[in-house]
Amino acid sequence: MGRNELSDFFWKKVRANDRISSPMQEEKKNKIDWKPAVEIFTQVSTWIAVPIVLALIFGKMLDVHYGTRPWIFVVLSAIAFIISCYGIVKIVTKYIDKMKEK
């Protein structure tokens, strides 16, 4: 093979590889993106943890201050549960609507 023939052979192979996708490219096309799942997990976890932690802190503090142990804590925990349920329903509804659009 001469120099031009070798060069032509090389460039034909390069062009052929551009048209044919590699297994890695095919895997990327078929792979489900994990970012939305992490985003939803983070949002739901936040809606669960923040109200409960705030109810714990302020419920205990107010119970000690007013001497009503454990009633303020129980009431704030119930309110935190309701807030958490609302937040989770809100996030899941938004996600479902987003999935219907796609």
Image (cartoon, rainbow, N blue to C red):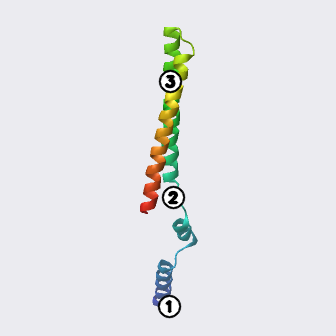
Above or below, 94 relative to 46: below
Which of 12 and 67 lies nearest the eye of the viewer?
Answer: 67
Marks 1/3: CA–CA distance: 84 Å
Residue 83 visible in image: yes
Residue at mark 1: 2
Foreground: disc 1 or disc 3: 3
Which of 33 and 48 lies nearest the eye of the viewer?
Answer: 48
Task: Give the amino acid type for the residue marked by disc 3 in the picture.
Answer: Leu
Residue 46 visible in image: no
Above or below, 47 relative to 79: below
Mark 2 vs 1, N-terminal side: 1
Q: Position of residue 67 (x, y in %)?
A: 53, 8
Task: Give the amino acid type for the residue marked by disc 1 in the picture.
Answer: Gly
- Pointer 2: residues within 10 angstroms few (<14), some, or many (20+)? few
Which of 15 and 51 lies nearest the eye of the viewer?
Answer: 51
Above or below, 44 relative to 6: above
Foreground: disc 2 or disc 3: 3
Task: Give the amino acid type for the residue marked by disc 2 in the picture.
Answer: Asp
Q: Residue at x 55, y 22 (%)?
A: 74
Residue at mark 2: 33
Q: Residue at x 53, y 28 (%)?
A: 78
Kind of element beneath mark 3: helix
Q: Are marks 2 and 1 in contact (CB under 8 Å)?
A: no
Q: Residue at x 54, y 11 (%)?
A: 68
Kind of element beneath mark 2: loop
Kind of element beneath mark 1: loop
- Pointer 1: residues within 10 angstroms few (<14), some, or many (20+)? few
Marks 2/3: CA–CA distance: 38 Å
Residue at mark 3: 76
Q: Position of residue 64 (x, y in %)?
A: 53, 10
Mark 1 vs 3, N-terminal side: 1
